Amino acid sequence: MDAPDYIICLECDTPVYTFDWDGIRIAGGICASCGNEKPMLFSTEEAYEEMMASEDGRHYGSGHD
Ligand SMILES: [Zn+2]
């Protein structure tokens, strides 16, 4: 898998362009917005969109109260 153009900080939902890619996954990064530098708290754009899509699905199911 090629390195993405940017990753997304899951702490503050900000795109981060300064990060390390180990060929498969995010090896490290630093969020300029909130200072997060834990690899597990970053996501690729693709994974982030999947995550958002599944959360939207859940909101649809319980949005009629
Ligand atoms: Zn952040």
Image: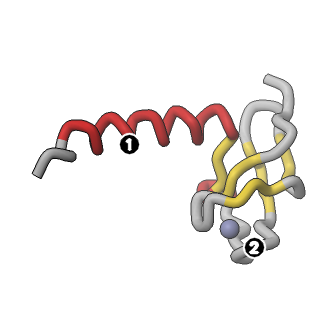
Tell me the amino acid under the disc marked 1. Glu
Measured as percent of width and height from the top left, residue 10 is found at 59, 58
Q: Is mark 1 within 8 Å of ligand 1?
A: no
Name the residue nearer the viewer: 27 or 48: 48
Answer above or below: position of 2 versus 30: above
Few, some or many C-alpha atoms within 10 Å of disc 2 (few <14, some 14-19, many ≥20)? few
Measured as percent of width and height from the top left, residue 34 is found at 70, 76
Few, some or many C-alpha atoms within 10 Å of disc 1 (few <14, some 14-19, many ≥20)? few
For disc 2, the marked residue is: 33
Answer above or below: position of 37 versus 26: below
Res. 5 image quadrant: top right
Ligand 1 resides in the quarter of the picture at bottom right
Cα distance between the residues tagged 2 and 1 = 24 Å
Name the residue nearer the viewer: 1 or 60: 60
Residue 38, which numbered label?
none
Measured as percent of width and height from the top left, residue 22 is found at 83, 40
What secondary structure is found at the residue carrying circle 1? helix
In the image, is 58 to the left or to the right of 3? left
In the image, is 50 to the left or to the right of 59? right
Tell me the amino acid under the disc marked 2. Ser
Res. 64 image quadrant: top left
Q: Is mark 2 within 8 Å of ligand 1?
A: yes
Res. 40 image quadrant: bottom right
Work out whether mark 2 precedes mark 1 in sequence or the reverse, and give the earlier one: 2
Q: Residue at horizontal 38%, vertical 40%?
A: 56
For disc 1, the marked residue is: 55
Measured as percent of width and height from the top left, residue 55 is found at 38, 42
Q: Which quarter of the image is occupied by the N terminus?
A: top right
Q: Residue at horizontal 59%, vertical 35%?
A: 47
